[in-house]
Amino acid sequence: MNTLPEWTDLRFFLELARAGTLSGASRRLEVEHTTVARRIDRLETQLGTTLFDRSREGYELTEVGAALLPHAEAMEGAALAAAEHVGGGEVAAQGVVRLGVPEVFGVKVVAPLLARMLQTHPDLSIDLLALPSFANLANREADLGVMLDPPSTGRYMVTRLASFRFYLYASPAYLARHPPIRSIADLAGHHFVDYVQDRLASRELSYLNELGFTPRRRMCCSGMMAQVEATASGLGLMMAPPYAVADEPRLVRVLDDFSAERSYWLAAPTDLYRLQRVRAVWNLLREHADGHPELFMHMS
């Protein structure tokens, strides 16, 4: 190899590695898919090796391509940090941050929090991905994310955002029509609203299994917002954290002595964590979670 590869070619390499298809990479890069293919061919020719295995399903990294990936990501992080520094990033956070969060947590907690933050950061913009699943940080779907399962491999900054509990709730109308609930054993005769079991975003969401019996799931939904509405309509009982039902007058808590505890984790690729705009959002989430434990657990 007589010359070093161009950074722009490595950027094409990164986006194709993350998207897995020419069409996906071309959308990310806002170019034609033929341009992506041409730049990858040029990079492979320059390096004298094959970086991707091609198939009908798409592009998959070869062993050499996988070895190149962390180096290209480090270059990307350095380029982003340099651009932020030159643009005055050390004075004020600026640019776009893409944040992935669970759907209800994003709607109830994070969106209002970010709205207040943006009022004091005129050069900052947020792409909030409030999803029924969890953002995929490996393919850079988001710059940072809140999740139940932290990354176990790769280069990430990870911290526990908060421990929280799922409690039982029902509508007063449902409780009036059904036998009283005085203990966990009484729950066996009741209906439940839950997640669609073969579409769980995480095994951590199978908290109804902790009841000790197979619940009678009357309705299953892909997201918790739909579960809240179904439960408020009197269909059955559900489990939810306090923030999901805050200011929801149609639901009351059932069995104060039963709950299921989980943890939210905050994670970001190490190279993106170095950017001030990402750290600004990171720190905001940490401070808010630390200062508002009532969002996550009922306080005695």
Image (cartoon, grey):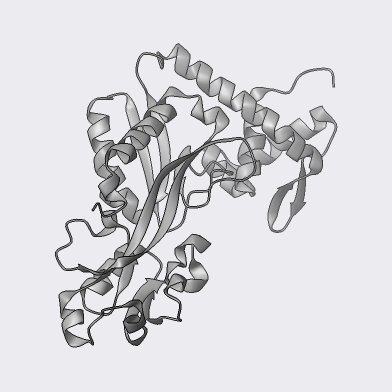
Q: Position of residue 112 (x, y in %)?
A: 24, 42
Q: Residue at x 22, y 78 (%)?
A: 234
Residue 149 left/right relative to 279:
right
The N terminus sits in image quarter:
top right
Res 288 → quadrant: top left
Q: Residue at x 31, y 64 (%)?
A: 167
Q: Is residue 290 above or below residue 72?
A: below
**Residue 31 appears in the figure:** yes
Residue 56 left/right relative to 96:
right
Q: Is residue 64 above or below residue 238?
A: above
Q: Nearer the viewer, residue 63 or 48?
A: 63
Res 12 → quadrant: top right
Residue 123 left/right relative to 11:
left
Q: Nearer the viewer, residue 35 or 171?
A: 171
Q: Is residue 215 above or below residue 139?
A: below
Residue 46 left/right relative to 264:
right
Q: Position of residue 157 (x, y in %)?
A: 53, 34
**Residue 196 appears in the figure:** no
Q: Residue at x 69, y 58 (%)?
A: 57
Q: Residue at x 64, y 36 (%)?
A: 14
How many labels were placed on the picture? 0
Q: Position of residue 48 (x, y in %)?
A: 85, 31
Q: Position of residue 260 (x, y in %)?
A: 40, 62
